[in-house]
Amino acid sequence: MGWRNALRLSAVGYRELAFQAIYAVRMGNLLQERREVDLRARTARRVLQSKIMVATLLGFMGFVGAEALDPRIARLLAPGAPPAVYAAALISGVLLLQLSFLWTTGLQILPTFLSTKYLPFLESLPIPPEDRTRTALLLYLRIFDLPALTILLVTPVAFGWALGSPLAGLATLPGALAVVLLALALALATGSFFVRRVQGSPAGLGSAALRWLFLVLWAVPAFAIYAFISFSPEFLARLTALTLHPTAALTALVVAFPFPFGFLPTLLAPGMGPAGIGLGPVDVAALLLAAAVYGALLTLLAAWLYRAPRAYALLLPSAPNGARRGPGPLHTTGVVTALLRKDLRIASRSPAYAFVILLPLLDALVLGLSTFVGHPAPSDVFRLGASAVSTAALLATFFGPAFFATEVMGYSYTRTLPLGVRSLLAGKVSLIVLIYGLAAFLVLSFTIARVFQPFLLVAFVLAELPAVVAAALLEIGLLFRISERRGLAVTNLYTGAWWAAIVTVPGIIVAGLPLGSFFSFGGDLGALGVMAGLALAELALVLPLALAWARRNR
Amino acid sequence: MGPGENGGRAVPLRAEGLTVRYGEFTAVDRLSFEVRPGEIYGLLGSNGAGKSSTIRCLVGLQRPAEGRLRVFDDDPLTDELLVKSRIGYVPETTLLFDSLSPREFLEFVASVRRIDPEVARRRAEGYVRAFDLGNELEQPLATLSNGARQKTLVVAAFLHQPSLLVLDEPLNNLDPRTVRIVKEILAEYVRDGRRGVLFSTHTMEVAQQLCHRVGILDHGLLRGEGSLPELRRRIDRDGASLEEIYLNLTRAEDAVMDAVRSLREL
């Protein structure tokens, strides 16, 4: 008994967790693998592949961030900013990005962690409670092992090398550790919220609206991080201005998470240090104090994390105490609408899916809002609106595979229904187009309210539409092709990163080509014509291909 | 038996030489049987006998390696959607969309099956009331008991009044009241002499009460088939229960006694 026993038990649990994450049989997916295939070995291989891809991306973020410390890039991104302020902002940005990515990855696997039932099974066995707690913790840590280790190793090495001081590199370690702890805690806490408030929420319009509101609130912190990255040049400019004319706002900013951890390495870097940091003594003292406070809070968080995985793994969805209700009418629709409605209903109770729907919409909202409040010149309004629509188109197609993954749920049942692959294809493509349409509508509303020139932006949205449809058809069609051979693929960051990547990359290219042509051809009416032509040509090319794949899959 | 021998009515289900393989392993070996119009046919067998593999072929979840299936003379492989539209299916497990409520699930099934909204409403209302499912109708399936989930599946199978019901252990998890209702409904369901029911179960008592004929599967092979009197004649034992017939035909009587003896010695 003890840690060794917990380690052994968590290894067994992790095999089960990985198996469920890949094959989702507890969610009603159909196991189509042949008996002679070693499923356990395949599971271990696929999870490892995905972990390596996620870890590579996290490492890439660290190295690119460190590379951006180059003075030439600094002059380009933040002209006039004190080097230490620029470095601190950059380290903080990388930490936020890593936090966001690790948290999102954790959320992809969390529903499986909560539904695997391995830990509740252990509760019925004569194992000491402390060992069960440790097993749950180790099982949870195994989910994040390689990505977390990458953050902890790459961040100090990359920034130590870029700042020219191993000691300064080591000073990024508290920040990296904070990122890992926070991502683990956030994934678990949001998972608890998902189980208690969202998954058990009853049917009905009012409850659905409340669920979506919860999900928007839930997605806001993750989106804030995304927005921070999107607006980093503007942010750096504002920060530079603040350091030139220090105010209380600067003090408030340097104590906000994760800036104290971003500033720590600069205090030890050659040529920077407390004197060259560009901050007054009060601000330096405030950020050191803040770093200590955050350190203490993170210690408490670590203590909480020790027990939380076991406690949360035993949670059950809270059933509503609804009054007895009669059967009432069933609202039937057409097949494609039924698929669309089913996916939206599933997303409204599954944060991982809700997130991929909400991200393009929130992006459109923020970018649209920025055109509204930013007082841009009338000539810039179209350019800003077009950029927002472009981002929405790329984000909607980026998450195509995730929408396909909802099909694993109840798959062994839905495959027995008279549901053609073409209908499924149409249902999934409709969802992607709906997201693009809603995002475009949001942007249009803001820009039209600012400058009434709807024609050009509506034309831009419509010109890109065939490309979005083509990208969605290509992605979903490719996934049907994969599922024909291997059974339905679970495609998410954690278990199916490889499948997601080989499908998403061509999708993004198809959605992005017309956008690229528009901006490179001068962004005028003529460029709009080229863009529309290219988008239509793509659709004409992809449509027969996707339909042929769908026919073969029948 | 062809349609002519069934008063000109099409045979709900016919399997001829059905073989299912998973790699080198043969799960179902040249299985032939039919569900006649107006008949409840019981498919009996131990775990791994091949019942679920047979059903998976029928409902489109598995391609047979050899042989053929016909549902009202149509081929599930070439007329997939037509055959699926004629079948109502209750799977062995209640793994559904945990995120949907029973009402949302039934709306999805009714929409995919293109059932007229008024008809869907009337039927759902009737079954929900009969199965006492009204309290759970708006709650996500994740929060419901296995019994409520099983009831939801049974309602979904009956919603389009299919010509062929394929039921894989449909009484699992159901309370005695609902079991009795389902039994009565099934007996009533085939009374028009056109529809058929394929009923897979481990429970011999249920099969004996409910099925007009049974087929006994063992390691993928059909060991015996017929009505209870026919099977009694086959093993030459008047008054034998279906359990006794099953153990005799699958040559499991000695194995059962050996197992019991070895457990006593523990």
Image: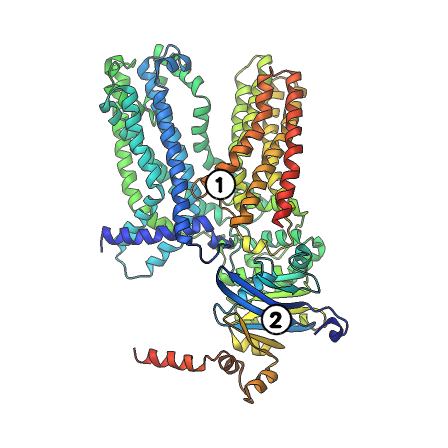
B247 left or right of B209? left
Residue A374 vs B194, above or below: the answer is above
Mark 1, chain letter? A
Specify few, some or many for label 1: CA neighbours under 10 Å numbering under 14, 14-19, or 20 or more: some
Q: Which mark is residue A499?
A: 1
Q: Amino acid at mark 2?
A: Ser
Q: Is residue A236 left or right of residue A167?
A: right
Q: Residue A417 location in percent, x, y?
A: 62, 55
Q: Is residue A167 left or right of residue B251?
A: left
**Residue A119 at what x, y percent from top left?**
35, 54
Residue A225 position by quadrant = top left
Cα gap from disc 2 to disc 1, whole angstroms: 41 Å
Q: Nearer the viewer, residue A38 or A177?
A: A38
Q: Nearer the viewer, residue A262 or A157?
A: A157
Q: Which residue position is annotated with label 2?
A: B32
| Residue A381 image position (x, y, % from top left) | 58, 17
Looking at the image, residue A200 lies above or below residue A400: below
Instruction: Return the x and y of residue B175 as percentages of the image width and height.
Output: 52, 69
Helix, strand or loop under label 1:
helix
Chain containing mark 2 = B
Residue A527 drawn above or below residue A104: above
Residue type at tag 1: Trp
Secondary structure at numbered mark 2? strand
